[in-house]
Structures are given as C-alpha cells and as structure tokens.
C-alpha cells in the first residue's frame, strides 16, 4: 500500500487526507498544535467556546462530498445550520443593509438604497453567474502546473474582464456607494483588496446565493472534529502536538518527514498544508529547491493580517445577527492604508461574529460569545511586535467603538476577553509576516502564478491550502485538496 504524509490539519490538510485515505492510500497527518484545525482552532474559556475562524461556511456540497467518497453522510457527524441574513452591513451614517439570498427581501433592500440599482444588480448577478461557472466550477478544482493551462483559461478571463478589480466591476453595474461596498467586500474574507483583487472573485456572490451561508452546531471546530473523525474512521493516523521540522529529501525526491520530537517516518509522497513560505524556507531550507523557492516567494505580495478580539459577555442579543460588517467612514483609502501603506489607521472596518444567536450552547446560560476582527497590515508592512500593552490598548479602542454603536454597556458586562494579533499568526501558525490568508489573491498571483499544487522540482511533493490554487476560504482550500488529491492519486498509481 502506498503511504502519504500530510503536514498540517487545517481544512485543506484534512480534506486532502480524507480523499487519499478514501482511495486506499495509507495517510498520516502530522499537526504542530494540540488540536486539528489550523486557522480553525478553538479555545474554551470560562464556559465560553471561541472559534478562531473561519466562521462563514459556503458551498456545503464541497464538504459533504468528502463523506460520500466512502458512502457516508456528513449529517451523521455534524449539523450545518442556515444563517440568515448572511450579513448585516452597517455604515457610520446609520444605513443598514441585510444581505441574504431571499430575492424579494434583497430587491427591497436594494431599492431602498437606490431604485435604479435594482436592474444593475440583476446584471451584476448575471456577471457573477458567468465568473462562477468559469472560475469556480471549471477551474477551481483543477491544478495549473504549466503556462499552457493558463493560456487555455485566458479567453474566459478576457471575456469576463479579469484585469478589472471587483470594486470596479461592481461599480459598472450599481451607483449607490453603500451597495458598491456591499457587493465588493467579500474579497476581504479571502485576503483580497476589493480595489485590486480580480473581478473573477465576484463569483463569491454567486457561491453564497447558490449554496447559502451556514454555521456548524457546536461552532466551526465541530466541523473540524467531524472531518478528523471521518479521517480516522477510514483508518488514517492523526499525529498531534509534534511540529514537522524537516521535509526530508534525497536527490529530487521527498523521502519522509522529521518532527521536533525526533519522530521520523518514510513516505511515498508528502503534501504540505503549512504556510507555503514556512514549507520552503524552514522545512526545505536544507535543499537547493527550498532556497530557490524561498527567494521567489519573497518577491510576492502577501495578504494582510488580522487583529481579533474574543469576548464573552453577560446578556443575550437577539437583535444582533450572526455576522455583521461594520464599515468605517473610509473604504478605498482605508484599504490602501492596510494593503499598501502599512498604516494602522485611526479608523477601522470590523467584522463581528455572534455565534450564540445561532447556537446558545457556545456560552453559559444567559451569556453570549462574540469575536470582532479588524484587518491590519502584516508584519512586513507594519513591523511592530504587538506587545501586550499596545495590543490591549488597540482592543480597548475597538470595544469602546462597539459599546458606542452596537452593544451598550459592553465593558461592564464582560466576563472574559483575549486577543489574537499578527504576531500570534506568525508564531502559532508559522504564517509568513503574520499574513492571515497567505498570498494575496491578485490576478498575477492566481492559478499558474500561485504556488503549484505539485512542486516543479520535487515531483512527489505537493501543496494544499490557502497558498496554492485556488486560494483561501473554505471552498478554496477544500477545492485545492480536490485538485491536489487528483495529482497525488495519479502519480502514486503510476509509481
């Protein structure tokens, strides 16, 4: 029986390992942390359950497929609950907009902003359908290993004006600035600047309209645990709390992995769900290939980081939906500060996650669990150490803003709180410069121009997750697992 190692138990690593094990490949996942999940980690403090993220589940079919490979039903292991509205969007001028896939409700909400934009939205939806078909259904689950594959995709990219940004394409359909922001902010969920990310990413709108937005009962980590259980049920081995220190090689072949504990094993194939820079620079730094790939990655643009505050409070808040986007007074200029200038601006835009409105069991009775995150520059653009004093002061500013605008009496109701900074992304997740989403999803860093699902020089070394094609987000990393698994199974069958 062929044997494979998967480094990292994030969504991408788990999805890949399930596919390999379902196909009869003896697979071992090696995870540095004490729990699976990667960025989808979980903390339990003072009776509150805090998901690290991600918290928006779209395209549930890409997940249920992982169970169907072995004739099982995902619903036996985890319950996905629909979230509606998908998001409530709020602006400082008092405007509020509920975004969902209820067509009649959405049409009324758009008409309330600008009646002339109802027809423009319909035309945008047609555009989103087209890029979803080309960018997700046709290209989102297949590897781009040579430039010829990019040439084949070029006509569709040109037809859909992929050189334009999401914000630019949205603005060509609708006039109201609130609506332009409402239809373009989604790229931030995968690390992309709406002002520069390719308009192909407008497919996210169709993805949500088509499949809805969901949340697992028990939190995102309940889905992680269900995936890990499915993998182990199939006979896979999950090795926790032992960071890989080396992808071992001999000539142009990966031979196995070595861990900090000294544990080592040999494998026919190795796949990394770890940060792509960490994989090449630290795990393959002993090899010429690792050093060459590191130099190439150093020239690329990485997505920003996040500052996240997790907090538990006394009281329940039925009026606050599961997901809220709180826009600041600036949109484009704030994004430029974060992505280009490396400025920690005085203003901020926030994402507020309120899971207990869907699942009260995530907090003690009569209490609520929240997290709020602010996109911030990564450590390469804002090289500060985020010490406790500085991070606490920044968290206080954000909590003060929430108290003033949305949650009166927040500070006096706090039961527990803690924060997660770009430095934590760098140390806990080995994320290059503390980036929360790996490579920025620019057109010239997509598909063939992203880290390849199979390494060009080490033919039995593979990549899965946010840094490879198609990119970040749960559908993206699960799609990368499908593309990478197809390559690995074909290669292993030939070997």
Image (cartoon, rainbow, N blue to C red):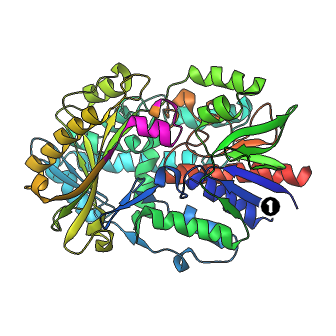
Q: Nearer the viewer, residue 254 or 466?
A: 254
Q: Position of residue 211 (x, y in %)?
A: 45, 63
x 39%, y 33%: residue: 193
Q: Quadrant of residue 332?
A: top left
> From the viewer's perspective, is residue 17 above or below residue 120?
below
Magenta-highlighted residues: 419-433
x 35%, y 34%: residue: 167
> From the viewer's perspective, is residue 489 above or below residue 83?
above
Residue 424 covered by magenta stretch:
yes
Side of 319 where 150 appears, left or right? right
Residue 325 covered by magenta stretch:
no
Q: Position of residue 486 (x, y in %)?
A: 75, 53
Q: Position of residue 464 (x, y in %)?
A: 64, 46
* Residue linked to disc 1: 25
Side of 312 where 285 appears, left or right? right
Residue 175 seen from this side = no
């Amino acid at each position: 029986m062929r044997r494979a190692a998967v480094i990292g138990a994030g969504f991408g690593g788990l999805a890949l390992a399930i596919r390999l094990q379902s196909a009869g490949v003896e697979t071992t996942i090696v995870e540095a942390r004490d729990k699976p999940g990667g960025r989808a980690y979980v903390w339990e403090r003072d009776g509150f359950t805090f998901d690290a993220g991600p918290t928006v589940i779209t395209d549930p079919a890409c997940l249920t497929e992982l169970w169907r490979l072995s004739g099982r039903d995902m619903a036996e292991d985890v319950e996905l609950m629909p979230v509606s509205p998908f998001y409530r969007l709020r602006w400082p001028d008092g405007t509020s907009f509920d975004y969902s896939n209820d067509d009649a409700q959405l049409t009324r909400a758009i008409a309330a902003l600008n009646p002339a934009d109802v027809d423009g939205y319909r035309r945008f939806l047609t555009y989103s359908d087209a890029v979803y078909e080309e960018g997700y259904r046709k290209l989102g689950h297949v590897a781009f290993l040579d430039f010829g594959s990019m040439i084949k995709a070029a006509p569709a990219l040109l037809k859909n004006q992929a050189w334009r940004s999401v914000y630019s394409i949205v603005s060509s359909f609708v006039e109201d600035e609130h609506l332009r922001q409402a239809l373009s902010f989604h790229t931030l969920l995968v690390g992309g600047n709406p002002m520069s990310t390719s308009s192909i990413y407008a497919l996210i709108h169709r993805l949500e309209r088509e499949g809805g937005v969901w949340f697992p009962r028990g939190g995102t980590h309940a889905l992680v645990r269900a995936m890990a259980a499915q993998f182990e049920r199939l006979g896979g081995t999950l090795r926790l709390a032992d960071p890989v220190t080396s992808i071992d090689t001999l000539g142009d072949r990966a031979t196995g992995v070595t861990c900090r504990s000294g544990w080592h094993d040999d494998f026919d194939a190795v796949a990394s769900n770890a940060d792509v820079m960490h994989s090449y620079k630290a795990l393959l730094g002993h090899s010429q290939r690792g050093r060459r790939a590191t130099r190439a990655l150093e020239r690329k643009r990485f997505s920003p980081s996040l500052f996240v505050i997790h907090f538990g409070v006394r009281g329940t808040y039925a009026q606050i939906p599961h997901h809220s986007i709180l826009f600041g007074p600036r949109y484009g200029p704030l994004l430029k500060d974060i992505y280009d200038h490396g400025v920690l601006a005085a203003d901020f835009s926030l994402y507020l996650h309120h899971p207990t409105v869907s699942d009260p069991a995530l907090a003690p009775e009569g209490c609520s669990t929240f997290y709020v995150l602010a996109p911030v520059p990564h450590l390469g653009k804002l090289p500060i150490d985020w010490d406790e004093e500085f991070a606490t002061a920044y968290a206080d500013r954000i909590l003060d803003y929430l108290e003033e605008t949305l949650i009166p009496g927040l500070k006096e109701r706090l039961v527990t709180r803690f924060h997660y900074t770009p430095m934590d992304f760098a140390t806990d997740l080995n994320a290059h410069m503390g980036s929360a989403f790996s490579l920025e999803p620019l057109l010239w860093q997509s598909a063939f121009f992203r880290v390849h699902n199979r390494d060009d020089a080490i033919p039995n070394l593979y990549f899965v997750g946010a840094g490879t094609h198609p990119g970040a987000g749960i559908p993206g990393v699960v799609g990368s697992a499908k593309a990478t698994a197809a390559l690995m199974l074909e290669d292993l069958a030939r070997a």
